[in-house]
Image: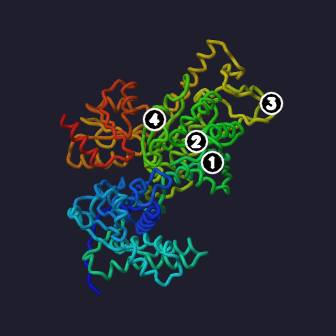
């Protein structure tokens, strides 16, 4: 058996790419889970085709999954992949420009047929024309090797070919010294009722692994040692999954049942799927006929004493706008999840964007303020989901929870918290009839009582018409309307007294402050860290509360000469900061359906420093 060198490396980024039917998401997920169990820090970026079923082998049908795994703390899925696994010409064409110079390029040469090359728009075979000479190209007949390994299986050729992703996975397991046990256990559990399929996938995985070990093709394989993580029990978690579990936890902390109503829409649908698995915690889910029905059902659930929750993406948030207005007028605790995606209209259904911020702030008729929060990482989705309900209940107000496609589908190791460390959520349903009025307000929060319909003596009416302060009777009095508008605005403003101050990453004052929000946290934080290591005067803050802003934000903004605001939109937060605090901000926009690279933000910081 040939002797192979093993080399330790600190961080590796791999991208698996193929046709949407090639199982690339499953391959990437298995590699991610194995790396998490191995003890690496990880960050992932699934990239789904926008079309439900594009023609096989076509450019729109390419599916990708990028995983960054490391022996140190990492904050993003990586800028340029070190390795690209391309299962067909279309996958190569879509992804090869991102591969680092000199990177490892593994292609399935069996798929480079005349027909597939034509579908991908290649005039010549790139495996033969020298155009890939800048990479370490490994051209392998993966389809044939997989078919030979599965010759004894009693499956159709189509079913045999569907296992070739596990051949590629096995090969990558050998190349990066990963154990196969995690995936073998998954195969046994997944296909326990179809032993022939389980056998085929097992053979494919092992064939790929031992192909790497026994051939002379790879002279070196690599090891990424375990990361030094804070002691505790960890699991790999995706943003949408963390969001759903956070809402279930909030329900348990409040001891109030959770009701989730939504209309399926990418990339928010996973929240419905996950919540529907938790009926044992009293969670009720309902798939509605449209977005208007979903927000209306959530409001009704909150009126009846449940945690009324709804979620959507893209154009769905437009359709919910009148319902959100009703929640503002009725002053009921409702949480609205918006997993932002590329737009407008149907836009880029599977790609990320941060362009719903101004709609969240102002996208309703009249004066209609709501609280707005945004998680920073996939794991942070759990904590901000709890925070959304803490604020909604305490202030009797709708809360908009702005996630995005990058957070929703990305994953990272997540330290499972202890229940005693989670915040308390106090719910006080009004039960005393004496002195009750539906719009009687708490002096500190201005919240009105939460009275469950049917409670004797607490009968009251709600609806979209303006109410008289305190009594809740319908009122057209001009002065009362002015007063109610001011009260609803003041209630949201007072939330600033109840949220943490911003912490500056770096020196508390200086030349450049980088301001981020939502899913840009990892790229901004890593970029600022890199620039600070060169002793350059750069600091950063990250906003998780967007309405109201933290109280110390204007003070921090005033301590820096230049304020750089990277966003996946055309400068919406930058516009808000200018309008509210009269500070000269420098917007840095990217609207390509892709997250920021660390290098892009580093380059911009250097440009601002030199200007």
Q: Which mark is residue 357?
A: 4
Q: Quadrant of residue 13?
A: bottom left
Task: Tell me the element at label 1.
Answer: helix
The percent position of residue 79, horizontal first and vertical second, equals 31, 53
Q: Is residue 496 visible?
A: no
Task: Tell me the element at label 2.
Answer: helix
Residue at 29%, 32% in the rendered image = 586
Residue at 36%, 32% in the rendered image = 574
**Is 351 located above or below residue 356 in the figure?**
below
Discs 2/3, front: 2
Q: Quadrant of residue 471?
A: top right
Q: Earlier in the sequence, mark 2 or mark 3?
A: 2
Q: Earlier in the sequence, mark 2 or mark 1?
A: 1
Q: Which residue, given by chain and number where applicable, does mark 2 sit on?
A: 389
Q: Which residue, given by chain and number where applicable, does mark 1 sit on?
A: 251
Q: Earlier in the sequence, mark 4 or mark 1?
A: 1
The percent position of residue 104, horizontal first and vertical second, equals 27, 66
Q: Which residue, given by chain and number where applicable, does mark 3 sit on?
A: 457
**Is 414 located above or below residue 371 in the figure?**
below
Q: Residues within 10 Å of mark 3 (few under 14, many from 20)?
A: few
Q: Earlier in the sequence, mark 2 or mark 4?
A: 4
């Amino acid at each position: 058996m040939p002797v192979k060198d093993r080399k330790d490396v600190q961080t590796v980024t791999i991208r698996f790419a193929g046709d949407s039917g090639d199982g690339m998401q499953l391959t990437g997920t298995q590699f991610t889970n194995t790396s998490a169990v191995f003890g690496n820090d990880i960050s992932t970026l699934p990239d789904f085709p926008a079309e439900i079923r594009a023609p096989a082998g076509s450019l729109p049908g390419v599916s990708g999954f990028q995983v960054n795994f490391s022996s140190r703390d990492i904050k993003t899925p990586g800028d340029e992949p070190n390795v690209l696994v391309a299962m067909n010409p279309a996958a190569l064409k879509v992804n090869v420009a991102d591969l680092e110079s000199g990177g490892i390029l593994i292609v399935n040469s069996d798929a480079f047929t005349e027909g597939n090359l034509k579908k991908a728009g290649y005039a010549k075979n790139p495996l033969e024309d020298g155009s890939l000479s800048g990479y370490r190209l490994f051209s392998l007949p993966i389809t044939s090797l997989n078919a030979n390994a599965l010759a004894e299986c009693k499956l159709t050729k189509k079913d045999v070919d569907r296992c070739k992703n596990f051949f590629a996975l096995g090969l990558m397991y050998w190349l990066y010294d990963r154990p196969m046990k995690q995936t073998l256990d998954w195969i046994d559990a997944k296909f326990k009722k179809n032993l022939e399929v389980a056998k085929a996938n097992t053979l494919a995985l092992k064939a790929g692994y031992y192909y790497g070990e026994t051939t002379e093709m790879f002279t070196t394989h690599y090891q990424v040692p375990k990361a030094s993580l804070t002691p505790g029990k960890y699991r790999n978690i995706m943003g949408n999954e963390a969001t759903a579990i956070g809402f279930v936890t909030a329900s348990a902390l409040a001891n109030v049942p959770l009701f989730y109503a939504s209309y399926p829409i990418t990339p928010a649908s996973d929240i419905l799927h996950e919540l529907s698995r938790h009926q044992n915690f009293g969670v009720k889910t309902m798939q509605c006929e449209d977005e208007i029905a979903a927000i209306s059902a959530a409001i009704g659930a909150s009126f009846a004493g449940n945690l009324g929750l709804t979620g959507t993406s893209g154009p769905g948030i437009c359709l919910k706008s009148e319902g959100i207005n009703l929640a503002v007028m009725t002053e009921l605790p409702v949480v609205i999840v918006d997993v932002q995606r590329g737009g407008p209209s149907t836009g880029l259904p599977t790609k990320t964007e941060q362009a719903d911020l101004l709609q969240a702030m102002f996208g309703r008729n009249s004066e209609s303020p709501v609280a707005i929060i945004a998680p920073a990482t996939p794991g942070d989705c759990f904590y901000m989901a709890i925070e959304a309900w803490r604020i909604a209940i305490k202030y009797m107000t709708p809360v908009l929870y702005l996630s995005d496609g990058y957070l929703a589908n990305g994953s990272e190791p997540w330290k499972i918290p202890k229940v005693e460390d989670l915040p308390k959520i106090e719910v006080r349903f009004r039960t005393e009839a004496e002195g009750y009025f539906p719009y009687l307000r708490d002096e500190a929060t201005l919240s009105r009582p939460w009275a469950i319909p049917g409670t004797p003596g607490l009968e009251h009416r709600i609806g979209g018409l303006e109410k008289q302060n305190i009594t809740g009777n319908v009122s057209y009095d001009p002065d009362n309307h002015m007063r109610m508008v001011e009260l609803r605005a003041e209630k949201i403003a007072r939330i600033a007294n109840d949220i943490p101050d911003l912490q500056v990453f770096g020196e508390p004052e200086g030349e450049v402050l980088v301001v981020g929000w939502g899913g840009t946290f990892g790229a901004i934080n890593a970029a600022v860290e890199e620039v600070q290591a060169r002793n350059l005067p750069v600091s950063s803050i990250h906003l998780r509360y967007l309405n109201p802003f933290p109280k110390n934000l204007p003070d921090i903004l005033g301590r820096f000469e230049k304020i750089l605001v990277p966003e996946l939109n055309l400068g919406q937060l930058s516009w808000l900061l200018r309008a509210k605090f009269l500070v000269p901000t420098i917007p840095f926009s990217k609207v390509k359906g892709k997250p920021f690279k660390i290098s892009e933000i580093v380059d911009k910081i250097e440009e601002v420093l030199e200007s």
